[in-house]
Amino acid sequence: MRIKSLFSRKDKLCARELILNSYKPVRTTKNCTNNKSGMILKRIKQYLISFTLILLLLSDSLCANEYLFDIYFRGIPGGNASLVVDYQEDRVFASFIIHSSGFVDTFYKVRDTTRIVASYPTYHTLKYDKRIHEGKYHSRRTFDVEMIDTEKLKYPVRDEYTTMIMLLDSLYFSTDSVTVSLWDRKDSVAVPFRLYKKEKDIINSPAGTYPTLVYKPDKNFREVFEDESDLAIWISESIPPLPVQMKIRLKFGPLVCVLRKVIP
């Protein structure tokens, strides 16, 4: 025997609609746990990315590289130069070679070779051997920290090339100033001065166009080193930093080195 329901079809539909409308998802403990786990994983991922970028920056700045430059003597294209940098444990080995060519070489032949051994990460010059062949002027300048009386060495020596390499290191990149300390053979003393970060500059080089940080010396440098008073270094704001341009002074005038190529 079939028993007739006390509720009509309309009543059942209304009740069903009320149940559906009243349903709201409940945030369970399981959902909370999943959300927290997702946030933790996201943060870990961000930390790993940041850590990887830092490692890449440090590894790039400490790799052995060769930098090739075009040189200009009083604005005239005059040959090429190369800077080779190699890191070995707590030492930096570098060489800087200038070789004139073309029109300049005919009238003023330049064959300068500088070899350096410096400490890492302090970038203090330990050995320095510069052989100068500029026109008819030939000379040699050397420095060996082991051959110097420590009482006379009040300041650690840091030559201009070691300084440029130092500014390429991420530990010192974009620093406001850096101390350079040149060895004065005449008085057997290290003469310190500072390079200060000046205005930014855009340099168009054969290697590319770079926004750069410009480092120039203080007045003390110009007063002490009158015959070498032209010194400026342009470091790119890229990763890794590049020695885009360098201005130094030879015996008879300023020389500008402009980056042409980087060889890893």
Image (cartoon, grey):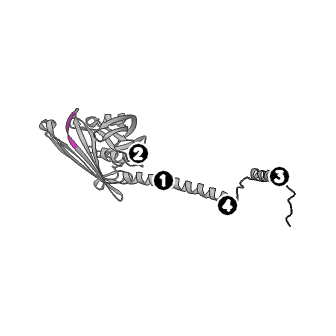
Amino acid type for the residue under numbered disc 3: Asp
**Which is more N-terminal, label 3 or label 4?**
3
Q: Are marks 4 and 1 in contact (CB under 8 Å)?
A: no
Tell me the residue at 41%/41% (across/down).
Answer: 177
| Kind of residue at badge 2 | Phe
Mark 1 lies on residue: 49
- Residue on which disc 3 sits: 11
Query: Which residue is under mark 2?
Result: 173
Q: Secondary structure at mark 4?
A: helix
Label 4 and label 3: CA atoms lie apart by 37 Å
Q: Which mark is residue 30?
A: 4
Q: Which mark is residue 213?
A: none
Earlier in the chain: of badge 3 and badge 2, it is: 3
Asked whether residue 128 is in view, the answer is no
Residue 75 at x, y = what percent? 23, 32
Left/right of residue 140 with respect to residue 160 in the rendered view: left
